[in-house]
Amino acid sequence: MKNNLESKHILRVYEHIQQHGEPYEQGKHLEGITAFSDIDGYTIYLQGNGVLLRFGFHNKYDLEYEHSKLKEEFLKKLDVIAKQFQ
């Protein structure tokens, strides 16, 4: 996927969910998005709406989804969360 999400945006949303989200099976959950990391903390994940965003070293990310509409809804939710701390 073309790199059109800013790394800072992803990291801020992840941190906001970790600080203000409710405990969930894998991590913390807020506004329909679950934030968690792998065991060593080098890769973080944001998951919701049938979409998984994997963010790791060198500010590279990967979005997994079946339909582009799911991706669009997911990205809108990330923006809603991001606006909570602006």
Image (cartoon, rainbow, N blue to C red):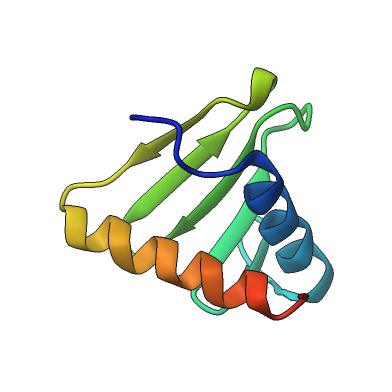
Query: Is residue 65 shown above or below 3?
Result: below
- In this rendering, the answer to whether 68 lies above or below 85 is above
Which x, y percent locates residue 2?
36, 30
Q: Residue drawn 18% across and 47% down?
A: 66
**In the visual, does 68 lie left or right of 16?**
left
Q: Nearer the viewer, residue 17 or 80?
A: 80
Q: Is residue 57 above or below residue 61?
A: above
On the image, which quarter does residue 42 sit in? top right
Q: Nearer the viewer, residue 79 or 30?
A: 79
Q: Quadrant of residue 26?
A: bottom right
Please state, as top left, top right, bottom left or bottom right, where the N terminus lies in the image.
top left
Locate the C terminus by quadrant: bottom right
Task: Report the residue at 26% width, 46% height from top.
Answer: 65
Residue at the farthest top position: 58
For residue 51, side relative to residue 34 (left or right): left
Horizontal and vertical percent position of residue 57? 67, 20
Q: Residue furthest left?
A: 67
| Total count of labels | 0
Residue 79: percent from the left, percent from the top?
53, 69
Q: Is residue 66 above or below residue 62?
A: below
In the visual, does 60 lie left or right of 12? left
Q: Position of residue 49 (x, y in %)?
A: 34, 65
Q: Can residue 27 be seen from the camera position used here?
A: yes
* Relative depth, front residue between 25 and 78: 78
Q: Residue at x 42, y 70 (%)?
A: 76
Q: Which residue is situated farthest in the right direction here?
A: 19
Residue 30 appears in the figure: no
